[in-house]
Amino acid sequence: MPAHIEITKNIVSFVVGSSTAFTVKRALTANVQTNKRRHDAEAYVGGFVIGAMVAEQSEAFTDRKIDEYYEKWLKLKDLIKYAEVKADN
C-alpha cells in the first residue's frame, strides 16, 4: 500500500478506536448502579477493557474497508484509462 493510504488508515483507526472505546465505556458506566468506590472502579476498568476490545475489532473492520475501497479505486482508474485509450482509437 502507498504511504498515504497507510497514513489514512492510521488516522481513521485512531479516531474510530478511541471513539468506540469512549462510547462503550460511557454506556457501561452510565448504566451500572454503584454505591461503593470499588464498584465504580470495576465499572470503569470493565468499560475500558470492553471498549478496547470493541475498538480493536472496529479498527480491523475500517482497515479492511479502506483496503477494499482502495482496490476498487485502482480498478476504476484502470477502467477509465482503458476507456480513454479505446476512445482515442
Image (tube, rainbow, N blue to C red):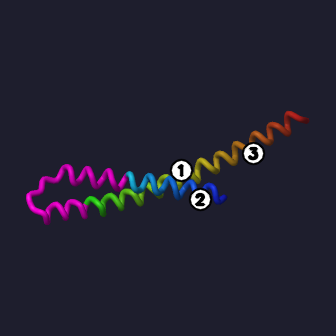
The CA distance from mark 2 to mark 3 is 21 Å
Question: Taken as a whole, is the magenta stretch helix, strand or loop?
Answer: helix
The kind of residue on which mark 2 rests is Glu
Quick check: 84 left or right of 25?
right
Which residue is denoted by mark 1 in the rendering? 65
Q: Which residues are magenta?
A: 20-46
**Residue sitting at x 47%, y 54%:** 61
Q: Residue 70 at x, y = what percent? A: 62, 50
Mark 1 crowdedness (10 Å alpha carbons): few <14, some 14-19, many ≥20: few
Residue at image position (8%, 58%) is 35
| Relative to 48, residue 74 above or below | above
Residue position marked by numbered label 3 in the rendering = 78
Residue annotated with mark 2: 6
> Which of the two discs, 1 and 3, labels the residue nearer the N terminus?
1
Residue found at the very far bottom of the displayed protein:
38
Percent from the top left, x then y, of residue 11?
51, 55
